[in-house]
Image: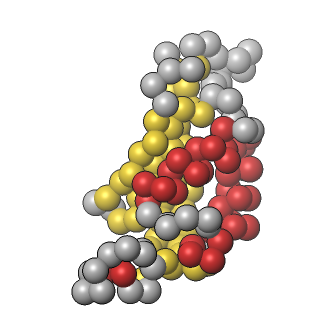
């Protein structure tokens, strides 16, 4: 199995609902997010790629147009935890990227949420 990944970044704010008032994430705060998309294939195309990285420009367009420098509570239809975001982004990107099998969202260099399908 061949695998590739590509990272994209954006900055945004959010408030996490349902936390105690003293929890720092219940207040307005922001992150410099890193989204990583993971693709896999059993075979390479005639060039020797799973997919040309330039064919992932739709991911960058979505991030730049929808998420970057936004308040995520205003643009996402759910409580904007990293765990909720990974599944949502997977569902959006999978429509155009059939080789996609996982999405990661990192809010900090030490934290990552991952949504991955086992097999298809």
What residue sits 62% from the left and 65% below the top? Answer: 77
Would residue 78 appear left or right of 114 to someone viewing this image? Answer: right
Q: Is residue 85 above or below residue 30?
A: above
Decide: is 14 above or below 9. below
Residue 105, compared with residue 90, is above or below; it is below
| Image quarter hosting the C terminus | top right
Instruction: Note whether 107 is above or below 101 in the view shown.
Output: below
Q: Give the left or right position of residue 98, taking residue 104 as reference.
A: right
Instruction: Please provide percent x and percent y for residue 33.
Output: 47, 65
Q: Residue at x 50, y 51 (%)?
A: 86
Residue appearing at x 31%, y 58% in the figure: 111
Q: Position of residue 11 (x, y in %)?
A: 53, 73
Outermost residue, left side? 22
Visible residue check, residue 106: yes
Query: Which residue is at a point 58% across and 51% down the rendered structure image?
Result: 88
Figure quadrant of residue 99: top right
- Considering depth in this image, is 102 or 78 the residue closer to the camera? 78
**Can you see residue 4?**
no
**Quarter of image, res 53:** top right
Front-most of 92 and 57?
92
Image x and y of residue 116, in percent: 46, 36
């Amino acid at each position: 199995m061949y695998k590739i990944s590509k990272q994209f970044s954006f900055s945004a704010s959010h408030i996490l609902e349902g936390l105690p008032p003293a929890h720092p994430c219940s207040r307005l705060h922001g992150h410099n997010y890193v989204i990583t998309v993971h693709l896999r294939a059993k075979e390479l195309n005639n060039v020797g790629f799973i997919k040309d990285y330039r064919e992932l420009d739709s991911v960058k367009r979505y991030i730049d147009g929808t998420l970057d420098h936004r308040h995520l509570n205003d643009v996402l239809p759910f409580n904007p935890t990293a765990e909720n975001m990974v599944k949502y982004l997977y569902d959006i990107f999978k429509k155009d990227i059939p080789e996609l099998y996982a999405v990661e969202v990192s809010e900090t260099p030490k934290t990552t949420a991952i949504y991955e399908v086992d097999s298809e």
